[in-house]
Image (cartoon, helix red, strand yellow):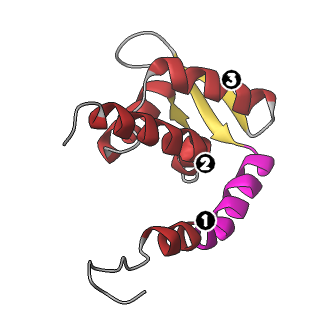
């Protein structure tokens, strides 16, 4: 690996994350409401989608402003009350739409990335 390659890879990964993070967060709430730290842990567990509180909490605020999620405060057995985020009907529709669009998008990107490269000496 050449110097600077890891920086380029980190930037590319960050750009990919930005594009899908909102929908991954919404997808994590499909089955039940979640609180912020729980969402962060699930993203961390995925490996590729690990991010920070400084990214997730502003995203959750925007999702709330856009009426894609609602929030409720619930007491916690360990520590202070937690703000739980739950999908609204609009949020559920957004994740369903993304779920329909994603395979075509993924396949299109894969088609560009997986084009066989000619070997040296191959006729063009």
Mark 3 or mark 1: name the one nearer the start of the chain: 3
Q: Residue 74, labelled with which disc?
A: none
Quarter in which the N terminus is drawn: top left
Q: Using the image as rendered, state which of residue 24 and residue 116 is in the foreground.
A: 116
Q: Earlier in the sequence, mark 1 or mark 2?
A: 2
In the rendered structure, which segment of residues is drawn in magenta? 88-105
Residue at numbered disc 2 = 23
Contact (Cβ within 8 Å) of mark 1 with mark 2: yes
Label 2, residues with CA under 10 Å away: few <14, some 14-19, many ≥20? some
Left or right: residue 7 versus residue 34 is left
Q: Secondary structure at mark 2?
A: helix
Residue with the mark numbered 3: 61
Earlier sequence position, callout 2 versus callout 3:
2
Callout in the foreground (1, 2): 1
19 part of magenta stretch: no
Image depth: mark 3 or mark 1 in front: 1
The secondary structure making up most of the magenta span is: helix
Residue drawn 26% across the image and 78% down it: 120
Residue 26 appears anywhere in the view: yes
Viewed as shown, does residue 8 lie left or right of 100? Answer: left
Q: Alpha carbon of mark 2 to alpha carbon of mark 3: how far?
A: 14 Å
Label count reads 3
Q: Which residue is pictured at 29% across the width and 37% down the height?
A: 5
10 Å neighbourhood of mark 1: few (<14), some, or many (≥20)?
few
- 7 is higher (above) or lower (below) than 116: above
- Mark 1 = which residue? 102
Q: Would you say residue 72 is visible in this rendering?
A: no
Say if the magenta span includes residue 102.
Answer: yes
């Amino acid at each position: 690996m050449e110097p600077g390659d890891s920086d380029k890879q980190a930037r590319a990964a960050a750009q990919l994350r930005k594009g899908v993070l909102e929908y991954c967060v919404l997808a994590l709430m499909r089955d039940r409401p979640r609180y912020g730290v729980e969402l962060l842990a699930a993203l961390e567990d995925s490996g590729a989608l690990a991010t920070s509180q400084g990214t997730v909490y502003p995203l959750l605020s925007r999702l709330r402003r856009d009426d894609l999620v609602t929030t409720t405060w619930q007491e916690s057995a360990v520590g202070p009350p937690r703000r739980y985020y739950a999908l609204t009907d609009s949020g559920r529709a957004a994740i369903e739409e993304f779920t329909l669009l994603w395979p075509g998008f993924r396949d299109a990107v894969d088609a560009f990335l997986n084009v066989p490269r000619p070997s040296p000496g191959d006729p063009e």
